[in-house]
Image (cartoon, rainbow, N blue to C red):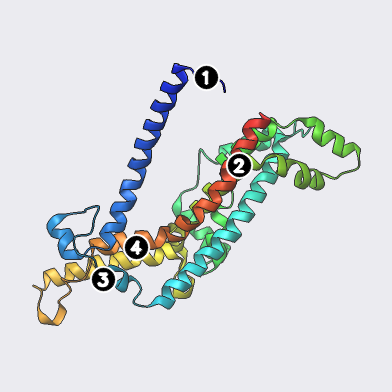
Amino acid sequence: MRKTSPDIVIFNIVAYLLLGVFAILCIVPFLMVLSSSLTSEQDIVQNGYTLIPSSFTFEAYEVAFKNPEIILRAYGVTMLVTVIGTISSVYLMSMTAYVIHKRTFRIANGLAFYFFFTTLFNAGLVPWYILIIKYLNLKDNLLVLILPVLFNVFYIIVLKAFMRGVPEALSESAFMDGASEFRIFNSIILPVSKPVLATVTLFIALQYWNDWYLSMLFISDENLRPLQLLLYNMVTNADELRKISALSGGGASIDLSSMPQNSLKMAVTMIAIGPILFLYPFIQRFFVKGLTLGAVKG
């Protein structure tokens, strides 16, 4: 066996130590959120947030899941929007990047500038809101949670830059064999672009999963509320109820001082990141594999 040089040993020790410290810094906040969600409200007020619950309780989760069918319905809406939106967004942005990356396409540069120009100027919130409500008639429609964020110019530029590095000989040889542009795109460009597609897919999925702003503006039907908006309203309502209780002097008619507030926020955070937390190890496996393949292909 070849002997490892002292420089490599020192480098490995320093690298592992730095990675270990970074991992601890990443996991400590998560453990604190989990611990706080299982701690009673009184202990949080008296002792603050701790890594180990001083008094173990599911009070915050009981309040959050008081009506479990509402939570499950919101989960379903969020998952539906995330899956459909992510697949559609990644495919359409990849198709757009494929078109504007081709040097033989005469208006490719002009089209790329058109996309880039939209990132510099916009009409503002009010015209956009009128367009969605009055002209597109997307009020209380799940499409309003998908279409506005379907295209992201930054990700299109990233995809375009990656596709510029794919040898044109692959597309030219397939075209000479009679393959259409759709066949070249689906059978050659997409498989070769797995590393960048994995990265973009991850970020787009997180964007759809965490979005609550669009639903706050355009969704008033309770059956169409996504998870993030439901949890946001839950925490906001709890804060308002506690303020009302404080202003009323904590009388018997409206005594909500014991309702969890800080622990409820932490429980809501755990509910929101739960599916992502369980699915991330599987996503990470394909994500890292794609990055490795991309590094080998150079």
Q: How many marks?
A: 4
For image coordinates 12% across by 69% down, the residue present is 247
Gap in Å between the C-alphas at discs 4 and 1?
53 Å
Which mark is nearer the camera, 3 or 1?
1
Check whether the beta carbons of the residues at disc 1 and disc 2 lie within 8 A of each other: no
The three-letter amino acid code for the residue at tag 4 is Val
Q: Is residue 186 left or right of residue 228?
A: right
Residue that carries the numbered disc 1 in the rendered image: 3
- Who comes first in sequence, dot 3 or dot 4? 3
Left or right: where 55 falls relative to 222: left
The residue that appears at 52% across and 61% down in the rendered structure is 145
Q: Where does the image place residue 166, in percent across and percent down from the top left?
A: 72, 32
- Residue at the spot of label 3: 59
Quadrant showing the C terminus: top right
**Residue at disc 3, secondary structure:** helix
Q: Secondary structure at mark 1?
A: loop
Residue 268: give its label: 4
Amino acid marked by disc 1: Lys
